[in-house]
Amino acid sequence: MKMSFRWYGSSDPVSLEYISQIPGMHSIVSSVYDVKPGEVWPEESLAKMKADCEAHGLVFDVVESIPVSEDIKLGTEKRDAHIDVYCENIRRCAKYGIKCVTYNFMPVFDWTRTQLDKEAPDGSTSLVMYWDQMKGLDPLKDDINLPGWDASYTQDEVRDLIRAYGEIGEEGLWKNIEIFLKRVIPVAEECGVVMALHPDDPPYPIFGLPRVITCEENLDRYLSIVDSPSNALCLCTGSLGCAKLNDIPAMVRKYSSMGRIGFMHMRNVMIMEDGSFEERAHLSSCGSLDMYEITKALVETGFDGYVRPDHGRMIWGETGKPGYGLYDRALGAAYLNGLFEACGKAVK
């Protein structure tokens, strides 16, 4: 297992110096953030990030993400050119030491929350999604700006995209996924890169958009399209885990045994009676997920990929990018390191 930490580059208020002081920290997870989907990443950006990380005793070997453009997801006339660019970006990442690339196939927006600063009784704040706050919202009629939505889109563009996805439906999205994978995975294999698919967050339809990376049956379907170690999962416990039907320890054990988990996003959520959820501290007792059983499944199946504490509360007066402060994610890393050590010694 290689412990890692998400870093948003030189503009991130969490410095590499501080990240390097977290015990057991190995890898930096980052991306090139100033290039639009469908455009080639400058090699200078990758080289600089690699050098900055190495100067602090860290390794830049995970990219999160190379975004999949809406043109690829929808299969527009720009799709083939965008896939060519995507393949070139994989090659460039590999040239600078990247071993794992995370991406997703979520239409229009990467994730959905209704609030980024829900205050808990102890004064900490976290990300939540409450169905009560979603009631009556219709993006085809109303101007909506939910957390996680791409702010670069105008309201009219969002409406056009939602209509376009409605026309292709789930099977149309699956078709475009297949075209993407059959072009991209052979390039990843040649480069020694693992492509790690992130599940939909949350893993169920939002505003009628097709969302297919949601459950064990669909993950099986995805992995079977190209049966290759390079076609793997970024198994996010918090994303899949906010749907009660997903047995996360069992899914982790299954896919890790198959060698098809490249990256683990490990965090805890509390699922409410109506399916709403709150992000919580990593400790098992703080949420609905058994982090010990998840870690045990990884250790017992010989998982040797990347792990990162995914999202954190804002605690101790820290301010910054919601979910991506230093303090609670550092606590999460320490907790996960402890679980891995204990589970590892139990196996031996």
Image: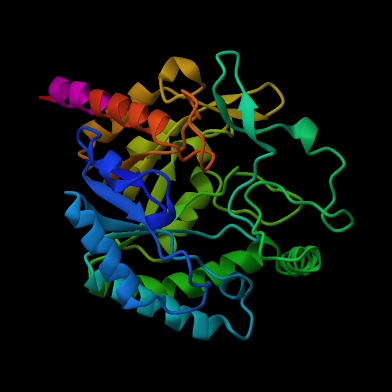
Query: Is residue 48 shown to the viewer in this render?
Result: yes
Q: Position of residue 258 (x, y in %)?
A: 29, 47
Residue at 54% of width from left, 51% of height from top?
A: 213
- Above or below, 186 against 247 in this view is below
Residue at figure coordinates x 81%, y 67% from the top left: 156
Residue 246 at what x, y percent from top left? 52, 34
Q: Residue at x 71, y 63 (%)?
A: 169
Check the picture and name the quadrant holding the N terminus. top left
Residue visible at 48% across and 31% down in the picture:
318
The image's colour scheme reads: rainbow
x and y percentages locating residue 136 in the rendered image = 87, 41
Q: Magenta residues, as a range?
A: 339-347
Nearest to the observer: residue 278 or residue 44: 44
Q: Is residue 345 magenta?
A: yes
Nearer the observer, 228 or 10: 10
Q: Is residue 242 above or below residue 98?
A: above
Q: Is residue 257 left or right of residue 146?
A: left
Query: Does the magenta stretch mainly form a helix, a strand or a loop?
Result: helix
